[in-house]
Image: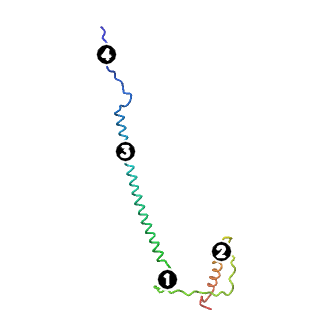
Amino acid sequence: MSRQPPPILFRYRPATGPSVTVVVAVFVALFVLFLWLHFIVAQQIESIGREIQVQTEELQRIERHSRDLQRQIAIAGSQKRLSFQAKSLGYQPQKPVYLRVEEPLPPDTTSIEGPVSQMSSLLFGFTSAMTRTSPTWDALTGQLNSSPAGPDSP
């Protein structure tokens, strides 16, 4: 009598893939994670937008204040106001000082005029600052410095 093993009705087979419930659970978890990250990013964008708005308002306030200060400086520095303040402090307008020139001034040899400055002198009636002031100023200051008595002496 040979004994045969009892027949096995169900065989154990390992699962070949994840079950449907696991796939659904992972999908739901990833979806919730995506929504949570989206919410955090939206909050950061909104808070940065508010900070930009506050900074812009402060910049506009500072610019308005700067324009007001520039306007006040322009008013305080106007010639009429300064003239009035000088007179109220006791200052008087000075008489012009004339220097007697006994010999003609030397010709202007330091001229750096080119075609553009010559054209501007022809069209607008002025010359460059270099040609207007250098030799004349040097001659007048030299004469003033060499004068022993001062500008009022004959």
Asked which quadrant contains residue 135, the reply is: bottom right
Disc 2 on helix, strand or loop? helix
Disc 4 on helix, strand or loop? loop
Identify the mark nearer the N-term, 3 or 1: 3
Residue 105 position, x and y percent, is: 68, 82
Disc 1 on helix, strand or loop? helix
Residue 67 position, x and y percent, is: 46, 70
Q: Which residue is mark 4?
A: 7
> What's the distance in space between the residues labelled 4 and 1, CA to CA?
125 Å
Identify the mark nearer the N-term, 2 or 4: 4
What type is the residue that disc 3 sits on? Leu
CB under 8 Å between callouts 4 and 1?
no
Q: Quadrant of the N terminus?
A: top left
> What's the distance in space between the residues labelled 2 and 1, CA to CA?
34 Å
Q: Which residue is mark 3?
A: 35
What type is the residue that disc 2 sits on? Leu
* Numbered circle sitting on residue 83: 1
